[in-house]
Image (cartoon, rainbow, N blue to C red):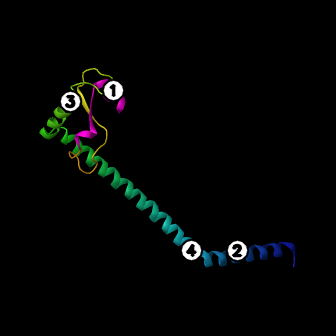
């Protein structure tokens, strides 16, 4: 047998061996790909849902800040702190949330609110 025939025979044997190995492990490879793609899909859906919830809470919070309930609570906090910024001592014009009632917007206790001047409030954010 000449060297070229030998080389061609070895080449085709290698292709057959690789094909057999691929055929043997193909179900596992497909399963891994499916799980990977499904995981990416679920991860993206989770991020999108979380972002939509965040935007909905933000919009609800912004609407709450326009209500009479917030205006009363704001007045009570400013009066409690004697209309003074709790950071620097100048007259306070704004109320800052130390914590947010994430899922119960408007249900935050007065203790979670503090009077601040505009400058200090901007520093907080």
According to the picture, the residue beneath numbered tag 1 turns out to be 87
Quadrant location of the C terminus? top left
Secondary-structure class at tag 1: loop
Instruction: State how far apart marks 2 and 1 are (Cα).
Output: 75 Å
Q: Left or right: where does residue 100 sit relative to residue 78?
A: right
Foreground residue, 119 or 34? 119
Q: Against 72, is 30 above or below? A: below
Tag 2 and tag 3, C-beta contact below 8 Å: no
- Say which of 4 and 14 sits in front: 14
Q: Where does residue 6 sit, x and y in percent of width and height?
A: 83, 75
Say which residue label 3 marks: 78
Q: Mark 4 points at which residue?
A: 28
Q: Label 2: which residue?
A: 15
Q: Earlier in the sequence, mark 3 or mark 1?
A: 3
> Are the residues flagged by discs 3 and 4 in contact, CB closer than 8 Å?
no
- Dot in front, 1 or 4: 1
* Residue at 50 percent of width and 64 percent of height: 36
Please report the residue visible at 14 percent of the width from the left and 36 percent of the height from the top. 72
Q: Where is residue 13 in the image (x, y as percent from the top left)?
A: 74, 77
- Of circles 3 and 4, the one toward us is 3
């Amino acid at each position: 047998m000449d060297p070229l025939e030998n080389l061609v025979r070895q080449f085709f044997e290698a292709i057959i061996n690789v094909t057999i190995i691929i055929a043997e492990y193909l179900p596992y490879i497909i399963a891994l790909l499916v799980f990977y793609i499904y995981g990416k899909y679920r991860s993206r859906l989770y991020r999108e849902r979380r972002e939509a919830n965040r935007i909905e809470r933000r919009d609800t919070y912004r609407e709450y800040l326009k209500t009479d309930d917030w205006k009363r609570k704001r007045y009570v906090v400013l009066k409690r702190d004697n209309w003074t910024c709790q950071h620097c001592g100048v007259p306070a014009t704004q109320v800052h949330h130390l914590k947010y009632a994430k899922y119960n917007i408007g249900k935050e206790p007065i203790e979670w609110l503090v009077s601040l001047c505009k400058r200090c409030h901007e520093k907080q954010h």
